[in-house]
Image: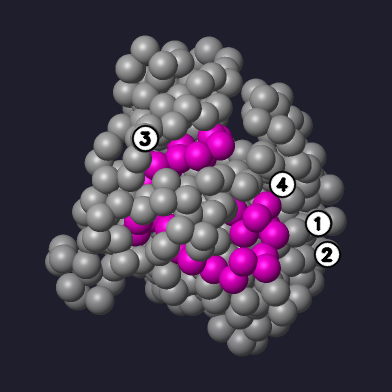
Amino acid sequence: MAQQVQGVIARAKGAPVEITTITVPDPGPGEAVVEIQACGVCHTDLHYREGGINDEFPFLLGHEAAGVVESVGEGVAEVEPGDFVILNWRAVCGQCRACRRGRPEYCFSTHNAKQKMTLADGTELSPALGIGAFAEKTLVAAGQCTKVDPSASPAAAGLLGCGVMAGIGAAINTGGVGRGDSVAVIGCGGVGNASVVGAALAGAAKIIAVDIDDKKLETARSLGATHTVNSRSTDAVEAVRQLTGGFGADVVIEAVGRPETYQQAFYARDLAGTVVLVGVPTPEMRLELPLLDVFGRGGSLKSSWYGDCLPSRDFPMLIDLYLQGRLDLDAFVTETIALDDVEKAFERMHHGDVLRSVVMF
Ligand code: APR
Ligand code: ZN
Ligand code: ZN
């Protein structure tokens, strides 16, 4: 029996989000219905609302979520009812060339539920990132559910589903940060501060946090940054070089998504260093670099998409670290809110005080 639940939708470009009744079908083959316990508010949800992703309105927003599997469809082996899961937007196919070559994090046929959730009048919803978790229940592909230790707090666990994983993964998976490395992180919001945490977990000796907001830098320090630079008043590249004996950092992570900070990241790296771009640019943005500087410095310029994560490998491991007290995910939960407070949380995002607002059910 299909069920009616409350969900937050974006009906039209730029219009405020609204809470409404949605219909969630029973899970079909390979699908699962998950009862959502917590879902973080991410910039991508706002981008959907603003029409910046595509124009397939109405969207069911929300995608950084944890909850309990309520029911599964035919042939589902990954999870069973009662499992505590984190939802992901990288359910890999196992068949494509990337998967067969052992690089499933670059799978090019990741999948979502085949059936559609709908509005009361039957209009089909487009779930954000194939998830749609600002809803009491949602329908996903079973591969989008990763079972983790149920003693983790749902608010903290859900954040691994997107932004925090993107940041930790940018440092560990994409950047390959290792013991003793120097790391600079430019932009210390939810994503950048997660990169600070990732660098600390990987054993970096020096972690330089760069931001234009002192409050973000304070948080970065509490999460493991060894040095902080306010780039409103100080030249970020010069400061990173000075703090690394005149050379630059082994790994520089850009977590803002602007040409100026991409450029700073490029020049703040040591010879043969790695630059990791995790901030998402707009389609109009361009980066101009003298080719000789690219050629002459060696190293690499990489982009990190979802932290190059593999949910089945990374989520349970990070939850274990969290439960052991070695990974402070709670620090990213600035506030918990109700489902009807998403619109206000979008506004607060711009004021800079919030790493993550998390909707609790
Ligand atoms: N230099 C340094 N830091 C900056 C600058 C700048 N010129 N401009 C903004 N910042 C800082 C902000 O002060 C803030 O702390 O960048 C941080 C951005 O953080 P959030 O707005 O919280 O964004 P976050 O969720 O961390 O995402 C950052 O990563 O995944 C992408 O789409 C996401 O592009 C976005 C980026
Ligand atoms: Zn694949
Ligand atoms: Zn997100």
Q: Which stretch did the figure color magenta?
A: 130-158
Label 1 Cα neighbours within 10 Å, binned few <14 / some 14-19 / many ≥20: some
Q: Amino acid at mark 1?
A: Thr
Pointer 3 or 2: first along the chain:
3
Asked whether the viewer can see residue 206, the reply is no
Q: Is residue 40 above or below residue 15?
A: below
Describe the colour scheme in one phrase.
one colour
Q: Nearer the viewer, residue 147 or 168?
A: 147
Q: Amino acid at mark 3?
A: Met
Q: Residues within 10 Å of mark 4 (few under 14, many from 20)?
A: many
Judging from the image, what secondary structure is the residue with disc 2 in? Answer: helix
Tags 1 and 2 in contact by the CB under 8 Å rule?
yes
Circle 3 is placed at which residue position?
1
> Along the polypeptide, which appears first: circle 3 or circle 4?
3
Please, what secondary structure does the residue beneath circle 1 have?
helix
Percent from the top left, x then y, of residue 167? 57, 59
Mark 4 CB within 8 Å of ligand 1 = yes
Residue 28 drawn at (x, y percent): 27, 45
Q: Which mark is residue 219?
A: 1
The tag on residue 355 is 4
Which amino acid lies under the numbered mark 2 shown in the image of this protein?
Ser
Do the CB atoms of the residues marked 1 and 4 lie less than 8 Å apart? yes
Q: Is residue 156 magenta?
A: yes
Horizontal and vertical percent position of residue 327? 70, 71
